[in-house]
Amino acid sequence: MRKLDRKLIRDLFHMKGQAIAITLVIAAGVAVFVMSTCAYASLSDGQIRFYRNNRFADIFSSAKRCPKALIPRIEQIPGVSTVETRLVYDVLLDVPDMTEPATGRLISIPEIREQRLNEVYISRGRMVEPNRLGEVVASEMFAETHGFKPGDTVRAVINGTVQQLKMVGVALTPEYVIQLQGGAMLPDKKRFGIFWVNERQLESAFDMSGAFNSVLLKLEYGANLDEVIDQLDKLLEPFGSIGAYDRSQQLSHQYVTDELLQLKTMATVGPSIFLSVAAFLLNIVVSRVISQQREQVAALKAFGYFNYEIGFHYLNLVMVISMTGTIIGTLFGFWMGANLIEMYQEFYKFPLLKFQINEIAVLWAFLLTTFAAVVGTWLAVRNAIRLPPAEAMRPEPPPTYRPTIVERFVPLGMLSAELRMIFRNIERKLLKSAVSIVGIAVAVAVLILGSFSLDSLDYLIDFQFRKAQRQDLTVSFVEPATSSVVHEMSGLDGALDSETMRAVASRIRFQHRSRRVGIMGLESEPKLFRLLGEDERPIAVPTHGITLNSKLASLLGAGLGDRLNVEVLEGKRPKINVELTSIVNEFGGVNAYMDKRQLHELLKESAVASGAFLKVDSNRLEDIYQELESRPGVGSVSIKDANIRSFKETVAENMLTMRSFNILFAVVIAIGVVYNSARISLSEQSRDLATMRVIGFTRTEVATVLLGEIILFTIVAIPLGWLIGYWFAAFMIMGLETENYRIPLIINYSTFAFASLVVVLATFFSALIIQRRINQLDLISVLKTRE
Amino acid sequence: MNTDTDTEHRTAVFRAADIAKIYQMGEVQVHALRGVSLELFDHEFVVLLGASGSGKSTLLNILGGLDVPTSGTVHYLDNELTASDDSKLTQYRRKNVGFVFQFYNLIPSLTAKENVELITEIATDPMDPLDALDMVKLKERANHFPAQLSGGEQQRVAIARAIAKKPKVLLCDEPTGALDVETGIVVLEAIARINDELGTTTAVITHNAAIARMADRVISLSNGQISAVNENASRIDASKLEW
Ligand SMILES: Nc1ncnc2c1ncn2[C@@H]1O[C@H](COP(=O)(O)OP(=O)(O)O)[C@@H](O)[C@H]1O
Ligand SMILES: [Mg+2]
């Protein structure tokens, strides 16, 4: 081994504490990067394969009842390559292990031919056999959650009559990779299931022979999407179509795409912070090492070592640290990625979703860390090799100290010698001190960034599901129900309060932008389903005009007072021009609201309802469920508490796992920064400190000088860290925002306190180590050697 | 011993002509050397004598290719050092020059032997590192780290390191400056032996006139100029020196 390399190893060993701290910071950054990029590759690959193999459609539309005779005309639309038609109905399910009703989405399977699009993938059991009534294939998510095996049955209320459905198989579909009911913000594995049924059975149950109510299109390569949607809408309009949409509006696809987007954000934000911190730490540590080894460098140069040899020597030192960090980080990233994919398997159902090692990502990780390391080290190394050897041989001139600003304002004598030393030290190396403070502040910020998600989530749940929506149950009707049905609903035994709503499909246009959204007609002063303004106070639904949530308003680019074109996609399809009279805060989806009476007038209809919100006596729940299940008009019942619970059990739990990783990494950064800053101050000042000890200062007094500096830095850094943490969080949230979710920027005081506490503890432990070192200061040797 | 005093027949290893060195210290100019011309010959043992601040180190650094003069020319054999770039100077030092510094400048994380090996690794025809340590009588301390050696021992390691590549010239900047008399003498003996046995052209800086007696020639510097050049009729053995 070259002697220069042996020196490298011994130097590394000498600074092992610092080296380990930096290695871990790098490892953390690499781990997050490798995890998210590998998870991205796995998920995206699973998605692409599933879509391709099972022929996921490009365009989706539904109607009330279309004759099959329409199919040839759909096929003739330019750009369409495949057309699939089917029947889709939501029904109430009576599942043996649940008292509350679930919703089943029944999808027809053609009997005499293969499926053309959105083919189901049978993962267990078999496909329903032609002509067999009562056989179904259930979605895997639902079957797994309930522990169903092929052969088990559920009861469904199909068009008013109870039928036994025998599950003969379990399947997946690209259409419901995530099992989510339209309008719901959260996936529900337990109360929403997909069932594939023989076409004949649905035709007869819903009196739909020779007709379809759902159509899927696959496009030719290069087809004009908007053109096809337009033509399809024109064809289906007379049959009650509520408008076609492409994959970007398809719920399951949206969620998977959002997840991919979020992985991308994760792969950039986290690692950039970690690697910047690592570069910063490497810079301060290597600068210090090189300035300590100034004379060794001079000797090497004097003996004819080339600049590049010396430069590489220090770069190698850094590379050992960064490579070790990268390797540890990569392995940890694989492990975390595999865990993440396992977690995804709970939400996303792909036939093949397995963790893939993304070699390119690993290569990138190596390149990025090397880049960060080289950048972090370059300045220090460059100065070292630039210094003429004759210059390097001379000891560094003693630093120039001046009375500090603080001393000018505070009367002399008020400051102790120790305090004066602290202030003078800081003022002399103002830039370095500032950098150390920012470093510690970043540690605080990363801790905040790593832990605030729970605050936001709690707030979101509280806001959306307790402050805004105060109903217990949301019942939706198969067909708009008359006021008498509604009246019955409120008269249910155990119902404490009720409210009705009218929902219609619509297309809202502003300028050149348009969106297909449901408009919900609400009572003018709703008590259960409420709209909240900026200050969380309920706002009345304006009696004229339309209310949008802020996401929809910003998607349309519309502001208060703008006039929007609204085209209702039901009934007589009225088109109106309305004023945007109010904008509300919501964290999920894109929604529009109107006064219910205004909507009735517009549709020229009586006071019918699409659904009802109920507040119920929790002791009477079972009766109410039974009652609801027995009503033919009831299409689905969603139970708020159950939704929240299942959300908390799954999403929140997984978020907690991620959060603990984040916190772990943040702690690594905090310790890395604080410990390194302290060690460097110690090494810079050890001579002065030893001198102080020699001339009679006590250990405590000497420690005050150094620890005082560290403590002062921490005190200044913490509030700065709160600010940076807030920015980081705001930045992160921007990256994670999707149409389906907005995460509110909520950081509780307890999170600020927690972040501060961790950094204070890191400071405390660094201080302990420093104190021990001060106690061990070798007075004689420090004074004997030069520098 | 070099008894040939006829300068005509000796090879001039170094030829410095009218070199000046000016350091710019903010507003002030420090004239470290003001027109120095000299020649150093093959095998010669020269002592550069002068008070602190007289420009000795500056001169030695320029000869050693560690620094360049502000004006004037320096030749090493046929190479004009003053016309060489940084990489040429490095090459020159790597091949031809051995340095010994006042504060040893050993690498603390390497043992005595490893410190020597650090240099022999990049030399073309080095001696065995242990032989080099043997020449300064430190073979048995080969595996000690600098911190485990006394000042004099460290300086002898530094000498072993300087001579291990069998350099043409050995330049020593106050090699005994940090040492007591006895240790200083041991170090000087080592330097003298190398000059003797290997025929290395040797220049030793000192502000201690007593040391001058062991040289072939003594060049006195004062205030950046050569104030005197004396040839010693005979060299005194280092062990007989006292100060
Ligand atoms: N890098 C430098 N910058 C400024 N002045 C210098 C530098 N090196 C040497 N000097 C000055 O040049 C003069 C000669 O220095 P030097 O050659 O080190 O003297 P000596 O070795 O004889 O003590 C001194 O006045 C010294 O202060
Ligand atoms: Mg000197």
Image (cartoon, coloured by chain):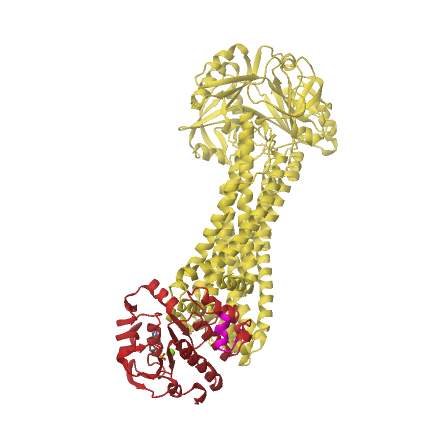
The chief SS type of the magenta part is helix
Seen in the picture, residue A106 relative to A678 is either above or below; the reply is above
Is B54 above or below relative to B115?
below
**Residue displayed at 61% across by 18% down:** A108
Q: Residue at x 28, y 75 (%)?
A: B16
Chain identifier for the red-coloured part of the image:
B
Is residue B137 found inside the magenta-colored segment of the image?
A: yes
Q: Is residue B20 above or below residue A187?
A: below
Displayed-image quarter of ligand 1: bottom left
What's the residue at 64%, 38% (across, down)? Answer: A650
A633 relative to A708 in the view: left or right = right
A17 or A490: nearer the viewer: A17
| Region of the chain picked out in magenta, as a range | B129-138
Figure check: A539 above or below A309: above
Magenta region includes residue A603: no
From the image, state the color of chain A.
yellow
Give A706 or A715, whichever is nearer the viewer: A706
